[in-house]
Image (cartoon, rainbow, N blue to C red):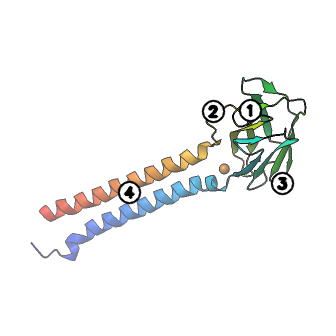
Amino acid sequence: MSQVGWAQRSPHLRLRTLVLVVLSVVVAFMFAATAPATAHDQLLSASPADGSISPKAPAELQLTFSQAPMPGTATIVAQTNTGVSVPLPKPTTNRGVVTVGWPSSQPAGTYRASWRVTSSDGHPINGTWTFTYGLSAAQSISEPVSVESTNSEGSGLWVALSAAIIVAILAGAAVLMMRLRRRSE
Ligand SMILES: [Cu+2]
């Protein structure tokens, strides 16, 4: 009873080996499927900076990315704090820097700008930032400012990781149950 022979143990071991192999393949597959997600371009900085308050209007808006986005894919739109859109020309992309001229006729105020580019890995990414000029800090709209940089890939990675962890836990539980059942026989 206490001694379990190799002949009896081997089916159990084979099952465990099979579970481990299947698990490894599943996890490897998930990482392979989500690997490009780590390669998409990141916004490093914006000018004027997000949440900044400056005395003078900017001559241009400029975004700096970690890698060069796909040429000709950048768009930048802006609006006033009352939602009136600011007419902007088409941005230019020079390596990782996307630039668009800011109309000098645009009065002092708080503006909200949104950008969208196709990342060098082919994925569209976008974000929004806010800046103020020509107003003192007290005059500027005191709304909470946040950098919203969204992409669907990040959440996809977490879903895949969560799924992998759940699969691992289920497989571990299955192996444990097989072992306990065998022991109780
Ligand atoms: Cu990407």
The single residue placed furthest to the right in the displayed view is 104
Question: Image point 68% across, 52% down: which residue?
Answer: 40
Q: Residues within 10 Å of mark 4 (few under 14, many from 20)?
A: some
Image coordinates of residue 55 in percent, x first then y, are: 81, 40
Q: Nearer the viewer, mark 2 or mark 3?
A: 2
Contact, mark 4 vs mark 3 (Cβ under 8 Å): no
Tell me the SS state at disc 2.
loop
Which one is earlier in the sequence, the residue at label 2 or at label 3?
A: 3
* Residue at mark 1: C-beta within 8 A of ligand 1: no
Name the N-terminal-most of marks 1 and 3. Answer: 3
Tag of residue 95: 3
The label nearer to you, 4 versus 3, is: 3
Label 4: which residue?
168
Residue 143, labelled with which disc? 2
Dividing the picture into quadrants, the one containing residue 182 is bottom left
Q: Residue 114 sits in which quadrant?
A: top right
Give the answer, above or below, for where 75 lies relative to 85: below
Q: Position of residue 105 (x, y in %)?
A: 90, 29
